[in-house]
Image (tube, rainbow, N blue to C red):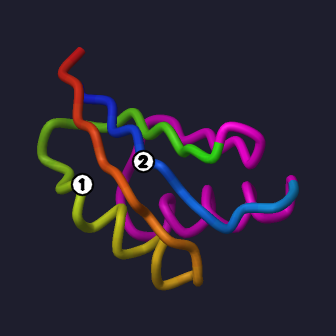
Amino acid sequence: MKEIILKVEGMKCGMCESHVNDAVRKAANVKKVTSSHVEGKTVVVCDESIDAQIVKNAIQKDGYNVSEVVENRT
């Protein structure tokens, strides 16, 4: 398992969080995804095989900017 933490700019409300979460779920088979517009971040828990770039691209395709990606092994 790994955790991908992305700094996401442009989320303004709970609906933005939902849009980001849905985009991530559609792009990759993740175990868990949570977003916070207050903290400006999205946390994804997934299998080792998922490429963080796929997750980043999915979020950016929805119109949000990802300025930082950190991968942690759990």
> Residue at (33%, 39%) from the top-left corner?
4
> Is 53 included in the stretch rendered in magenta?
no
Mark 2 or mark 1, which has the lower sequence index? 2
Q: Looking at the picture, how far across and down is residue 25, in whole percent? A: 50, 59
Tag of residue 40 = none
The magenta stretch is 14-39
**What's the amino acid at mark 2?**
Leu
Q: Quadrant of residue 67?
A: bottom left
Tag of residue 52 = 1
Tell me whether circle 2 and circle 1 mark residues in contact (CB < 8 Å): yes
Name the outermost residue toward the top. Answer: 74
Q: Residues within 10 Å of mark 2 (few under 14, many from 20)?
A: many
* Residue topped by disc 2: 6
Q: Looking at the picture, how far across and down is residue 53, in whole percent? A: 23, 64
> Residue at (43%, 63%) from the top-left corner?
66
Q: Quadrant of residue 21?
A: bottom right
| Residue 48 against residue 12 in the figure, above or below | above
70 relative position to 59: left or right: left
Q: Looking at the picture, how far across and down is residue 54, in whole percent? A: 27, 67
Instruction: Select label 2 or label 1 by which is in front.
Output: 2
**What's the amino acid at mark 1?**
Ala
39 relative position to 38: left or right: left
> Residue at (54%, 45%) from the top-left corner?
42
Whole-angstrom CA distance, mark 2 to mark 1, is 9 Å
> Is 29 included in the stretch rendered in magenta?
yes
